[in-house]
Amino acid sequence: MRIRAAEPAELPLLQDIERAAGEAFRPLGMGDIADDEPLPLEVLEGYRLAGRAWVAVDAADHPVGYLLSDTVDGAAHIEQVSVHPDAARRGVGRELIEHLATAAGEQGLSALTLTTFTEVPWNAPYYARLGFRRLEEGDPALGEGLREISRAEAAHGLAAWPRVCMRREVAARPARDQVPGERAGQPAP
């Protein structure tokens, strides 16, 4: 599997992946989640243009999963990560998250964050296995940006099911094109 930047022609495929992945919520009594429309193409294009949309591709270079990120409270925030059911349980989501962790470290961001459902097996329990921890009220890492995302999600109807903010620390690392010991934009001594 390879992870790369999403291409313009692939954006409708990302919507298809999201719709297909959403169907897994229907048997859990979360039909509203399954029926929720994916982000519009214009919004996906904004993520792509900003360099914050990645796809996991199969051997034929066809997207089977994707991840969108924002920067929230000084962390790389996972806005969306979805894997097509045909590629599920093969580590695609984990690889996309690891890709973001590497990019976040190279950008000097200290953590990954996300908001998710607490009782869906492939949500909070899955992210906990990947090293994310719950952010409880009073945790200094629960910043105003995450609080605003939670309020917006509640206004969108997601609060009908228990949700949580989560965080995973990442190590700072030099960018892939940097010489070890060199800071971005400055030569090594």
Image: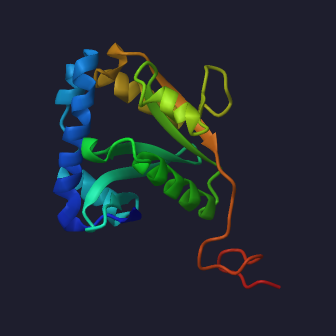
Residue 186 location in percent, x, y? 71, 81
Q: Residue furthest right?
A: 189
Q: Is residue 179 above or below residue 16?
A: below
Q: Is 59 displayed left or right of 178 in the figure?
A: left
Residue 145 visible in image: yes
Q: Image quadrant of residue 38?
A: top left
| Residue under the point 33% across and 65% down | 49
| Residue under the point 38% across and 51% down | 67
Q: Is residue 35 above or below residue 119?
A: below
Residue 135 location in percent, x, y? 60, 27
| Residue under the point 43% across and 25% down | 121
| Residue under the point 43% across and 30% down | 123
User: Coloring scheme of the render?
Assistant: rainbow
The number of numbered badges drawn on the structure is: 0
Residue 30 visible in image: no
Residue 77 location in percent, x, y? 49, 45
Residue 185 location in percent, x, y? 65, 80
Say which quadrant the C terminus sits in: bottom right
Say which quadrant the N terminus sits in: bottom left
Q: Is 82 displayed left or right of 37 in the figure?
A: right
Q: Image quadrant of residue 153?
A: top left
